[in-house]
Amino acid sequence: MRLPEMFGINVFNDSVQKETLPKEVYKELRATIEAGKQLDTSIAGAVAAAMKDWAVSKGATHYTHWFQPLTGLTAEKHDSFIEPDGDKVIMRLTGKSLIIGESDASSFPSGGSRATHMARGYTAWDPTSPAFVKEGTLYIPTVFVSYTGETLDKKSPLLRSMTAIDKQAKRLLKHFGIQCKKVNCEAGPEQEYFIISEEEYYKRKDLQLTGRTLFGSPVTRGQELEDHYFGVIKPAIGEFMRDLDEELWSYGVLSKTKHNEVAPAQHEMAPVYSTTNIAVDTNMLTMELMKKVAHRHGLVCLLHEKPFKGINGSGKHNNWSISTDCGFNLLNPGETPENNTLFLLVLTAVIKAVDDYQGILRAFVASAGNDHRLGADEAPPAIISVYLGDQLGAIVDSIIRGKNYVPGEKTQGSIGVPESPIFPKDATDRNRTSPFAFTGNKFEFRMLGSQANVADANISLNAIVADAFEQFADELEGKPDVDKAAKKIIERELKAHSRIIYNLDGYGPEWEPEAARRGLLNLKNTADAVPVLYEDKNVEVFVRQGVYTREEAKARADIRLENYTKIINIEALTMVEMAKRDVIPAVSDFIAELCGNLAAKRAVYDELPCETEKKLISRLSALNDEASLTVEKLESDLKNIDKREIVSSAKAMAHTVIPDMDKLRNCVDEMETLTSSDYWPYPSYFDILYGVK
């Protein structure tokens, strides 16, 4: 089958809807999807019947309300289409079953917003994200709320945040004479991942239980030669990528780019960006399919942010933009951005929002896995800053200084030989060291972790930018000269928020002290970052924009800290078990062999030099004792943490348990370099990273 015919073949998309639905029903449904019109529930029966017939024709026997609880994953409960008809059955999906379902909400995280015995929860159809058939089941994207009305998922607040952007952006555009039915926020999350051999994976307890290696000495050849990035794709990886692309395309996922990433065994998939709600759903589906397709090839896809110490970790760069239903991009600077007042006003709103609520953005990308990337083992830094590039940076600087901007001459690029094509140079360079960079007609938020649900980051961005839009729209009300009033806002707010703009090397040693001088937040771990979400200012912006209630905002912070504490606890206990049951005994056995060899040499010739054996025995014995003592301290520190206290237990994990874990790892990793591979109980980094051919 050719790609155009293959694309979206498993999706109940617009073309299928148009073909299978009655004309008036189709028209009503598209009005809901495209213009945000309230769903007419009277059409649900017709939509359900058409959806069921289409799904059955694709081999489906069941349907499920597919939702995104606060676990960060997806959830599903499958029901068959069958209904009794005498002594036979018929296949049926009712309008009520399409629109609403009931699920047990007691076992999902709620952040204390509801008691465990209050078990009833509802799933409600999200018509803006198309249903699809996978593995014999019709998947219906839904929201998830409690019996008492609290949102228990990530889709509900995401949809609310999109509504907030739509409402406030239309108000802003109206002042400039631009009318539209809907303003959409869009996202394109680039997905980084590792692929390793399934055989090696199942020999590592830490990979299976935590998604990362808790022990492992560095491989002698990592990424220092810089030859893996964009390098030739290995045959086994190429076959996996081809199958993954075909699978993704069949579900309407706009998988566009694939390549080797920086670290050995690391790769990336980048999609074309789409409406944020759909982008979130398709990214969750992408992560699931990556794992399943890898398994079919005898491989394992690792989505953890830092599966291997000492080499590049994995992120998820979130490309974010805002555009109208007519295709007008609010972040498109045009040919002369210095004269584009609307663009500069929108840009200023984003800069203001990021500066005012940098704590929110940092907290909602924080996780146990991402802590290894942000401000810890590698870049990007944990400090939020905005990169504008040379051209926009110069324009903004001229506005702040009250001077006229003088544009530079446009230049063309060439390598200097006649055969070389002449290519136009972009107005600005890219800055891969910036956590929040303007990239031509969108912003790239680069701090997200590779296994994160991208809803959280987009909810935050949408809410805080909508709030800035609202403030600007309020100020422009009744102004006779909108352009003049807007320019005053731009100048005032850029002066007030210029500290967040940084166009230099965000990885350089000079940035951290410079950020401190500017008064920017530098929250290096989840335990320190997430508590800012409890601050009144950060709660109120979500409440003001109708994204979270106060209770829902607090619940999100509670859940993030609880999850962090649980993950660190699992990792620590896994380390303890691996050290006590595998590593320490293995090293003891090797020491015993060395001692036996030493005794045998001495028995033959008492004066025989044995310094190598003695030094090795001494060092390994000291390290093994140190590892044993560190295990005891780690166990004791874990027992002394009161996990009922959410904030304090998270901080204890960050500032007491993790240092214990680091110390234990250092001991074990050094012992690995000194112990014979015949005795070492786990595959080495070399075995894992270079095991796939």
Image (spheres, helix red, strand yellow):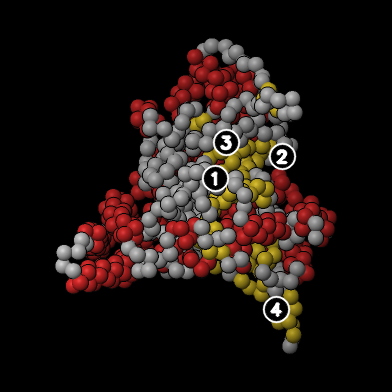
Give how far across and how far down residue 91 sits, in percent.
74, 75
Q: Residue at x 68, y 40 (%)?
A: 182
For label 1, the residue is 227
What mark, if any, has residue 443 been given in the picture? 3
Q: Quadrant of residue 98?
A: bottom right
Sort mark 2 into few (<14), some (14-19) or many (20+) by Cα contacts within 10 Å: few
Of tags 4 and 2, the one toward the viewer is 2
Q: Secondary structure at mark 2?
A: loop
Q: Residue at x 41, y 32 (%)?
A: 508
- Do the numbered discs 4 and 2 sit on residues whose CB atoms are within 8 Å? no
- Asked if residue 342 shows in the view, the reply is no
- Asked if residue 414 shows in the view, the reply is yes
Using residue 358 as the reference point, say whether residue 638 is left or right of it: left
Quadrant into which the N terminus falls: bottom right
User: Amino acid under label 3?
Assistant: Phe
Of tags 4 and 3, the one toward the viewer is 3
For label 4, the residue is 83
Does 441 sit above or below residue 253?
above
Does 180 sit above or below residue 211?
above
What mark, if any, has residue 41 been given in the picture? none
Q: Residue at x 31, y 59 (%)?
A: 674
